[in-house]
Amino acid sequence: MTANALVAVCLVGTVSAYGYVQWRLGQIKHEKLTALTNVNGGRPFTLLIVGSDSRAALNANDPANAQFGSASQTPGQRSDTIILARIAPATRQVELLSLPRDLWVNIPGFGQNRINAAFDSGPNLLIQTIQQDLGIPVNHFVEVNFDSFQAITDAIGGVKFYFPTPAKDAYSLLNVPAPGCVLLTGQQALAFVRARHYQYYENGYWQFEGASDLARIQRQQAFIKKMLKKAQGEYTNPVALNDVIGGITKNLTVDSRFSTNLLIELARDFRSINPSTIATLTLPNYGYTTSGGAQVLGLQQPQAAQTIAAFNSFGNAPAPAAATTTTPSKASSAPTVPPVTVAPASVPVEVANGDGVVGQAAKLANVLAAEGYQASVNAASQGTAYSVSQVRYAPDARTAAQQIAAAVPGGATLVEDPSLTPTAYSVEVITGSSYTTSTGGSPAATSPASATTAPATPATTATTVPGTNPGTYELPGMPPGATPPAC
C-alpha cells in the first residue's frame, strides 16, 4: 500500500510546470519530525514510506470502509507496511527495502516489541528504532492511509494481476472467485496488498500461502511495480492525474522538509523510470518464539548486516582512485576495518581510559561514533596498567567486538567477558598505551586462547528471505514450469 508516493512522483512529473499542480501539492499535510537525519541536496537519501492502519482518517461516509471498523474499535495506529526507498537522484535509481512488521526489535524507551508497534507513538519513534536498531539513516518520511491507496488505485484505472486459481483472505476480505486476469481496484486492491492469510484453491481444497507477512511483502513489491507501470500510461490523462493529486493531498503526510519543490524535482528526474529496474529487497530474517510466547522474526546474521550495508551505500559515487604519485612512505596506514557484518548503530559501546592520558577515552569514543557506533565514555579511570588497548565483549557480541577492535588506532586485544551480558553495553573498550590518536599502524586484533566463539544466529531455510528478492513474483497455484499469460 506504499506505492502511492512513488506513483505520485511519476504522474506529477509531466505537468510539474503548471502552477495548479504546485498549488495542489502545497496542500499535502506536513509534519515536523526531529528524528530524521539530515542529507545534503542532490545526494542519495532514504525515504521511509509507512502504510498506516489508523482508522482515524477514514471516510465514514464510504460504505467500503465499514470493514475496517472505527477508531474506537481499533484505536491507535500501527505501521501496516514499512518500506525504505533508497533514492539516488544523480543516477535516477531507486531501491526498495521492506521491513517485516513482526521484526522483534528494541524500541527506545519501551523495550522489546514488534517493529510495527513503534509507530503507535508516532513517526519519530519508528524512525529512531530503525536508525538505532538497524543502522539505517532515515532522511525523509511519507505516510499513506487506506483512503489514499484506494483513491489513487481507482484514479489510474486499477492494476491487473493474473490469478492461476481462485483466491481469498477472510481477514482482508479479498475475494477472487475465478482464475484469470483480474483488475484490482479500490477495495479489492487494498485487500490484496493487506492479505496476510492468503488462500488459493487447488486440488479440491483451500490452501494457505506460507510465510504470511513475508509472502505479503513480495505481493506488495510486485503490486508497486505494476502500479507504477500502469501510472506511466496515464501521463496524458488530465482527469486521472487530477484524481491522483486529489487523493494525495487529502490523505498523504510527509515530513516538513519534504518540500513541494523537492517532490517536483524528483518527479522530473524519475518520470521515465522503468519499474522493472527497481531492485526490491527484504531484510533477511528467521522465525522464533520469544520467552513470552510471541511468534516473531529476528535478524538473520550476517546476511542482514550485509544487506543493510549494501542498501546504505546504494547510489553513492565510488571512491576516487589513489593518486599514482603517492609514495609508500606517505601512504595512509589508517586502521583497516573488516567488512561490516553488524550494523554499527546497533552496538552500544562504552570507552574507558586505561592509560592515564587525559581525554584519551573521549577521543576514542569520537572515533567510534564517527564509524556509527553508539559510543559513550566511562568517566571512571581504569588506571595506567594497560599496555595494549582491550576490547571486552559479551559472549554474543564477538563479531561486533572484532569490528570495533579493527577500528581502534594502535590495535586492540579481544577478551570475552560474560559479566557484560546483562549490562547496557555489550562491548567495552579500555584504552592502553598502544593507543595513538594519529593514523599510525594498527596491528590486527588478537584474541586470547581462552576466548570462545559466540553462538551463530540460528540458521533456517523455512522462513529466511534472501536480501534480494526474485525479480518477478507469481501468485501460488501456477503449474510448475508454466508461464502466466500477460494481463
Image (cartoon, rainbow, N blue to C red):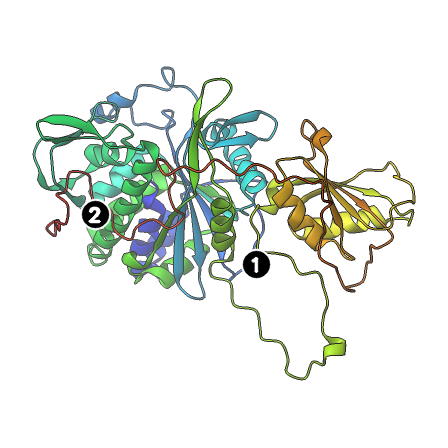
- Residue under the point 58% across and 51% down: 38
* 368 to 44, vertically: above or below: above
Measured as percent of width and height from the top left, residue 450 is found at 71, 40
Q: How many C-alpha atoms fall within 10 Å of the one at disc 2: few (<14), some, or many (≥20)?
A: many
Q: CA distance from mark 1 to mark 2?
A: 34 Å
* 346 to 139, vertically: above or below: above
* 399 to 108, vertically: above or below: below
Residue 174 visible in this rendered orientation of the protein? no
Q: Which mark is residue 129?
A: none
Q: Is residue 334 left or right of residue 311?
A: right
* 71 to 276, vertically: above or below: above
Query: Which residue is situated farthest in the top direction here?
Result: 73
> Residue 18 versus residue 268: which sits nearer the camera?
268
The three-letter amino acid code for the residue at tag 2 is Ile
Residue 145 visible in this rendered orientation of the protein? yes
- Residue under the point 61% across and 36% down: 396
Q: In the rendered structure, are the residues bearing label 1 and label 2 in contact, judged by CB atoms less than 8 Å apart?
A: no
Q: Is residue 353 left or right of residue 487?
A: right
Measured as percent of width and height from the top left, residue 153 is found at 23, 42
The residue identified by callout 2 is: 156
Q: Quadrant of residue 147?
A: top left
- Residue under the point 41% across and 33% down: 101
The residue identified by callout 1 is: 40
Q: Quadrant of the N terminus?
A: top left
Q: Quadrant of residue 59?
A: top left
Mark 2 secondary-structure assignment: loop
